[in-house]
Image (tube, rainbow, N blue to C red):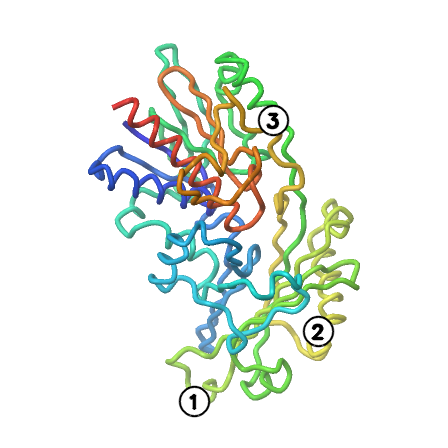
Amino acid sequence: MKVLFGGGGITGTAASWFVQRALRADGTAASPVWRLVDRAPHLGGRFASHPYIDEAMALRGHVNSGAQYLTQFTSDHDDVFDHLLAAGVIEPFNTSSGRISGIKAEYMSLPHFTAPKGMDSIARGLLADDALSSVRLGSSITAIDVEDDGRLRVTTENAHDNSVDVEHVTCLVLSVPPPHLWRIGGNVWQRLRDASPHGGRVVEALRSVQYSSRYALAVYFSMDEKEAADTLGTSAGWSARYVFADPDVRYVSTEVFRSTPHAAADDATRVLVSVLLHSSLPFYATFSSRPPEEATEALLASLRRECPWSVSRTPLMTQLVAWDVSQCSKSYGPTASAGSGGVDARSRDAAGSAPPAGDRLAAVHVDVGAARVVFAGDYFTTSNFEGCLDSARAAADLVVDHLRASS
């Protein structure tokens, strides 16, 4: 038996973690064979981190261009938070490590967490060290075909070495956002429609899912440590601010990184300041058809308005990221019902380990031939960390149930 996870974001990596845990609990840790692929060169999906390294100045840091911090709304995923805390992947956010301005008042008292090594480290933290050998980055699923004998054949192409892999899988978990699913060829979409009326409804519901789009701009500066403390109010740490008055920007965050330990004496007091801006949705709509340089210049103008200290400083580097799939604006439509082929958050665990989700599905599957195709992601639940975990747990249940039935 083989399980393939298509998508290395939080939903995909968490689903693989939940599946492996369930199989170890069954005493079947060695089975099945599993792999995870993602077309990006890094894990994390929209929990992406972009490093900056200047060896000459002994400066290293990063910008998290997607999610910036985690908020724990319920205790339903304590196992995941405890695992990441114990591994040192995340740490509690407090006033000594930074601040968040403009957050909703009802969220102020909730636990918040940051990832010192970058938000993409959370996805890596959900994979055991020995599991990383089963991960292939830079690999895209290009075709999914249902063969005449009912087996599911998946074709992947790797951008690094142009290699092509063809494999048969027992279970396929697709956690990529639906707008990106339609890049995948093969006969699977027609075969899903033909499998049952439910299969046709799933495909149509996936086609109806929509996401908002925005830009993220990373800007890096070098400062003296005292200068950073005087200018930013801190010489180390992270701060964020939600913006309401600027039509082009909705969010600004700043993080300060001290020089690396091997810095020369002249550079020992230098710090790297990384700034991130998230654009508004109308800004993306205006600039998405223009050269990226125009969007960068317009956002730099917003940076100078929002952070006056940047006016007299020349950036070390800027990096524009276009999030064509940012947050889900129209979620998966069908609700949980008999024959829906899905798992809702309330039905997963009799002990109530998942937050109430009404009758909304957290993941859905279609059995075609001898294989099972599972769709999962925040578009079933909520566009935040716990929404991804809700869907990942539901997807893992669907995978484990199929593996048990097939063994």
Residue carrying label 3: 205
Instruction: Using the image as rendered, state which of residue 371 and residue 51 is in the foreground.
Output: 371
Query: Which one is closest to the eye, mark 2 or mark 3?
Result: 3
User: Could you tell me how far apart the alpha carbons at marks 3 and 1 are, in whole angstroms?
Assistant: 60 Å
The residue singled out by tag 2 in the image is: 307
Residue at 66%, 75% in the rendered image? 314
- Neighbour tally class for label 2: few under 14, some 14-19, many 20 plus, Cα within 10 Å: some
> Judging from the image, what secondary structure is the residue with disc 2 in?
loop
Which badge, 2 or 3, comes first in the chain's sequence? 3
Q: Would you place residue 352 above or below residue 196 in this image?
A: below
Residue mark closest to the camera, 1 vs 2: 2
Q: Amino acid at mark 1?
A: Ala
Q: Residue lying farthest front?
A: 351
Judged left or right of residue 320, residue 288 is right
Residue 142 position within the rendered picture, expressed as x and y whole percent measured from the top left: 47, 29
Where's the C terminus, which quadrant?
top left
Using the numbered discs, state the Cα–Cα distance from disc 1 to disc 2 in whole angstroms.
Answer: 30 Å
Please name the residue shown 72% across and 61% down the image.
299
